[in-house]
């Protein structure tokens, strides 16, 4: 799984960046490929299309979600490039969860009504010392992501081309099950209906890093 964390903060080395590093580390430990990028309102966000999950995170300053992330959604091309993307959201702020869920999360969610939101969390600035909050966010995200893959596989079973099936059967039988699962997950993540030789080779390359 490929995830990108798009974030904004006015504080270099502040709580948002620390939380992002922790989320990134936990995702990487689960086997995900993770990148992070700081938002600029008018940047070109077409690169997010390469990722399976986009995590948006920012602090709240003076009752508003940090400005570059909001502006990227409202004025920039971020929203357009998030079409059909699976999203996770977190905010860091000093307000209690209940208040933040009503006042601040909707500032992001109003722009994401067509997206599947896998996980959302209010993470208080001190959460690194209570790392369960971040663990819970990452666990929710991974659980929901797996669920979307299973749903995708159930509603659109992946077909194998004859060539790809021949290639699969040519490898030692004890490895076939693992390769088959990796290829089917790779295809499901990318919305491929058929595993061809090219898809199988790409899945193998990704598995080998
Ligand atoms: C200038 C300033 C304004 C803030 N305004 C709010 C606010 O309106 N609501 C809130 O819940 N938290 C507010 N906070 C708390 C921050 O959202 C919180 O400390 C956050 O973790 C800061 O992230 P950073 O370290 O990346 O800057 C404010 C903090 C600062 C420094």
Image: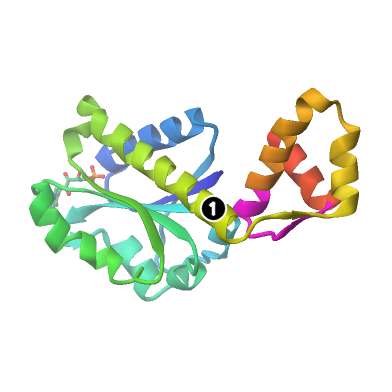
Was residue 145 drawn as part of the magenta stretch in this picture? no
Q: Is residue 43 left or right of residue 138?
A: right
Residue 113 versus residue 105 in the image, above or below: below
Q: Is residue 62 left or right of residue 81?
A: left
Residue 64 shows up from this direction: yes
Q: Position of residue 192 (x, y in %)?
A: 69, 59
Q: Is residue 112 left or right of residue 81?
A: left
Q: Position of residue 105 (x, y in %)?
A: 22, 60
Residue 63 shows up from this direction: no
Q: Residue at x 27, y 39 (%)?
A: 14
Q: Is residue 65 left or right of residue 205?
A: left
Of residue 68 and residue 32, the one placed in the foreground of this image is 32
Of residue 167 and residue 186, the one placed in the foreground of this image is 167
Q: Position of residue 153 (x, y in %)?
A: 59, 53
Q: How many marks?
A: 1
Residue 94 versus residue 136 in the image, above or below: below
Range of residues picked out in magenta: 186-196
In the current view of this chain or complex, which residue is farthest to the bottom?
75
Was residue 189 drawn as part of the magenta stretch in this picture? yes
């Amino acid at each position: 799984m490929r995830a990108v964390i798009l974030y904004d903060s006015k504080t270099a080395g502040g709580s948002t960046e620390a939380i992002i590093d922790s989320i990134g580390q936990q995702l990487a430990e689960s086997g995900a490929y993770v990148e992070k990028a700081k938002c600029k309102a008018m940047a070109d966000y077409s690169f997010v299309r390469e990722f399976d999950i986009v995590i948006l995170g920012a602090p709240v300053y003076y009752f508003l979600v940090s400005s570059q992330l909001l502006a990227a959604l409202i004025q920039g091309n971020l929203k357009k490039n998030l079409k059909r993307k699976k999203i996770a959201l977190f905010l860091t702020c000093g307000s209690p969860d209940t208040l933040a869920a009503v006042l601040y999360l909707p500032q992001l969610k109003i722009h994401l009504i067509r997206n599947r939101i896998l996980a959302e969390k209010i993470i208080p600035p001190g959460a690194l010392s209570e790392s369960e909050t971040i663990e819970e966010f990452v666990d929710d995200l991974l659980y929901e992501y797996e669920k979307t893959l299973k749903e995708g596989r159930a509603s659109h079973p992946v077909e194998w081309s004859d060539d790809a099936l021949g290639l699969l059967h040519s490898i030692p039988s004890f490895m076939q099950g693992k390769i088959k699962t990796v290829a089917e997950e790779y295809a499901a993540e990318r919305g491929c209906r058929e595993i061809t030789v090219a898809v199988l080779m790409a899945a193998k390359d990704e598995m080998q890093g």
